[in-house]
Image (cartoon, rainbow, N blue to C red):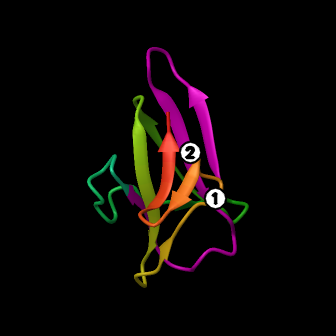
Amino acid sequence: MIKRSKLFGNKTRVTFCLPKDAPQGAVSVVGTFNDWTPGEHELKVRRDGTRTVTLSLGPGHYRFRYLASDGVWLDDEHADAVGPQGSELVL
């Protein structure tokens, strides 16, 4: 799931969230906003068992995927679109 909230100026706070039943172990969100660097934006476990990470992003078109520690790639069905190169987010 993706939550968005506008910030002052042209930035948007984007929270990437995975459900409790997502793969165990470390999961990071990687994409065009961080040069597809694993581990740079690792999701943290919340009390309810979901995992989230929040980024501040400028306007643009971003591609991203979640990368689990066992090398499993996950797309986000709540993204603006999902294509062969992953999930897409338009801000």
Residue projecting furthest to the right: 48
Pointers 2 and 1 in contact (C-beta within 8 Å) = no
Q: Residue at x 62, y 74 (%)?
A: 22
Residue 49 percent across, percent down from the top left: 69, 66
Image side of residue 87 versus residue 39, left or right: right
Residue 44 drawn above or below residue 71:
above
Residue 59 drawn above or below residue 24:
above
Q: Quadrant of residue 56?
A: top left
Residue 46 percent across, percent down from the top left: 64, 58
The CA distance from mark 2 to mark 1 is 13 Å
Q: Residue at x 40, y 34 (%)?
A: 60
Residue under numbered circle 2: 15
Badge 1 density bin: few <14, some 14–19, many ≥20, Cα 10 Å: few
Residue projecting furthest to the top: 9
Secondary element at tag 2: strand
Q: Nearer the viewer, mark 2 or mark 1?
A: 2
Any magenta on residue 8? yes
Residue projecting furthest to the front: 84
Identify residue type, mark 2.
Thr
Of 72 and 51, which appears nearest the observer? 72
Residue stretch rendered in magenta on the structure: 1-30
Residue 80 drawn above or below residue 28:
above
Residue under numbered circle 1: 46
Image side of residue 44 versus residue 57, left or right: right
Identify residue type, mark 1.
Arg
Image side of residue 68 versus residue 51, left or right: left
Q: Quadrant of residue 62?
A: top left
Any magenta on residue 24? yes
Q: Residue at x 50, y 61 (%)?
A: 83
Residue 12 drawn above or below residue 34:
above
